[in-house]
Amino acid sequence: MPLPSSGAISLNDVNVELGNTATAQISMNDAAVRTLFQVASGAISMSDGYGKSNSFSTTITSNQVDLDLRTYAVNAGWDESSALEVTIDTGIVCSASTTGVYGLYVSGSFPGGVTLINNGYILGRGGNGGSGYIGYIQYANGYSGGGGGPALYVSASVTIDNTNGTIGGGGGGGGGGGAAVVNGYNLSATGGGSGGGGGRSNAGYNSSGGNGGYAYAQTTAYGIAGNAGTYNAAGNGGGYTYKYSDQTGQYARGGAGGNGGNWGAGGNSGANGYYSNAYGVSKSGGGGGGGGSAVVGNSYITWTATGTRYGGIS
């Protein structure tokens, strides 16, 4: 805690603030004392130490994207040597702009140690939903959903209190639905797959739902696009493509897209296509994307409270 703002200050008080034992040998001219009192040279007195602290605290009060904790602290006034404490305020989101980066980085040098108190959210971006493939001649499997992105990267020793916080990788995107075709005498009908839903994402960077493929025979029918994943929920996959029937009553139908996954969870696979007679071909739905990691670099972390975490810890 800071030194007193008025009255007497003892060298024992200074020792404790510097992290020494109270009775350790110390003098006013020691480099550590001058750094603490912010008097680089010349005359120095106990009153120079009023209110001084050997630690620096700052609170993140606005949403951040691809945040580097060290850079943020330096910009907030940290001297790059004293103990550092950073608090993410209640409801604040530190999120990733793409699935290839992290919502928050703890890396670089922290000579006095660093403590992170998370009362908000550290999140990866959700994976995009896979699209359904077109029907007719080029009928094919649905596309796979994209994997969710990671949330927190750590490569420096840090103490984390996540009592009231959430750390979650992005949800995986749902797979696109498979197409199908049915052929025969006086019959050519094809169903295009529907798009998968986007994985649960983060504020301002919603994952996209997959596009619906289209089906073509004597008329065109379009698959249904999946919904985007948002901060509040994963996106739902598009429903199966409206069947095309010719005068014989036979039809092909594209599969429904899979739903996206919630934070840290994989998306669902798209459904297979369907055909109604012996001359058809059914193609598979695309697989769901995997959920993103909550934490990468766990060996560097001392957890005072793990709190709520979604996704892998490695």
Image: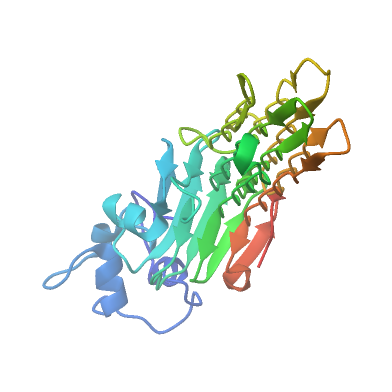
Q: How many marks?
A: 0
Residue farthest right in this picture: 278
Residue 201 visible from this viewpoint: yes
Q: Nearer the viewer, residue 260 or 36?
A: 260
Using the rendered view, name the quadrant where residue 282 is placed.
top right
Query: Residue at the location (56% across, 55% down)?
Result: 150
Residue farthest left in this picture: 42
Q: Nearer the viewer, residue 287 or 193?
A: 193
Identify the colour scheme used: rainbow
**Could you say where residue 311 lies in the image, as x and y percent from the top left?**
69, 53
Q: Nearer the viewer, residue 78 or 45?
A: 78
Residue farthest front in this picture: 185
Residue 173 against residue 56 in the figure, above or below:
above
Q: Nearer the viewer, residue 81 or 160?
A: 160
**Could you say where residue 173 lies in the image, as x and y percent from the top left?**
63, 43
Q: For this view, does 104 lie left or right of residue 30?
A: right
Query: Residue at the location (23% across, 79% down)?
Result: 29
Residue 80 against residue 98 in the figure, above or below:
below
In the rendered image, the quadrant that contains the C terminus is bottom right
**Could you say where residue 172 lies in the image, as x and y percent from the top left?**
65, 46
Query: Residue at the location (43% across, 67% down)?
Result: 107
Q: For this view, does 123 lie left or right of residue 16?
A: right
Q: For this view, does 260 lie left or right of residue 14?
A: right
**Could you say where residue 216 lies in the image, as x and y percent from the top left?**
61, 27
Q: For this view, does 26 lie left or right of residue 301?
A: left
Residue farthest top in this picture: 247
Using the rendered view, name the quadrant where residue 112 is placed.
bottom left
Residue 200 visible from this viewpoint: no
Query: Residue at the location (50% across, 33% down)?
Result: 203
